[in-house]
Image (spheres, rainbow, N blue to C red):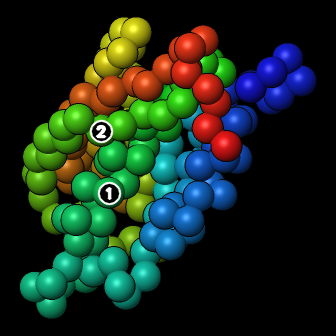
Amino acid sequence: MTLNDPSPAIWTCDTWNAKPYLQWAGARIVSAEAGVARIELTVQPHHHGAADTEAVNGAILAYLHDIVQGAAIRSLLGADVLAIATLNLNITYVDMLPEQRVVVGEGRVVSVRSAVAFAQSDFRDAAGAVCCQAAGTFRVVRRRADRPRPA
């Protein structure tokens, strides 16, 4: 990001939504600002769990937790950041997330240090009840003057 680039929030949404891993899943970051991000998934049949339920598969939810927490962290960081890498993601499944047309999750930054960040996220059902929660630890890889920018 330079002086002519958009805000970190706009950059995060636009850049991440263009990533194949978000498009593949059918998800999109709808907001990412001041350490809080929201993600939406338009539920398709391939998102269902394996137990012949119409609930969203736990692996899909884990994937979304990782992404929304990373987006929340990225919304606070500047142009010196090369990458954010997940070190640990701890998920608690409270209840099945019944199929809804759109599933929404929210990620929140707990703390950002120079090389590590911590975040939390949750997904709720249409009534607002928490279905699963996660806490993550992320490595913040920053650009150094002695390290050339990747091509």
Instruction: Please name the residue that numbered disc 1 is placed on.
Output: 63
Q: What residue type is labelled 2?
A: Thr
* For marks 1 and 2 on the same chain, the one whose residue lies earlier in the sequence: 1
Taking the spot 27% from the left edge, 80% from the top edge, the residue there is: 48
Left or right of 30, for residue 62: left
Give the Cα distance between marks 1 and 2.
11 Å
Q: Can residue 127 be seen here?
A: no
Instruction: Assign the N terminus to one quadrant of the image.
Output: top right
Number of residues whose C-alpha sits closer than 10 Å to that of mark 2, classed few (under 14), some (14–19) or many (20 or more): some
Q: Are marks 1 and 2 in contact (CB under 8 Å)?
A: no
Left or right of 133 on screen, residue 44? right
Q: Is residue 101 visible?
A: yes
Residue at (20% x, 41% y) in the render: 89
- For image coordinates 33% across by 78% down, the residue present is 47
Query: Relative to 124, is 102 above or below?
Result: below
Which residue, given by chain and number where applicable, does mark 2 sit on? 86
Across and down, in percent, residue 108 comes to 39, 28
Tell me: residue 34, above or below residue 126.
above
Q: Position of residue 5 (x, y in %)?
A: 83, 28
Question: Under tag 1, what secondary structure?
Answer: helix
Horizontal and vertical percent for residue 144?
Answer: 54, 15
Front residue of 116/132: it is 116
Give the residue drawn at x 67%, y 43%. Answer: 151
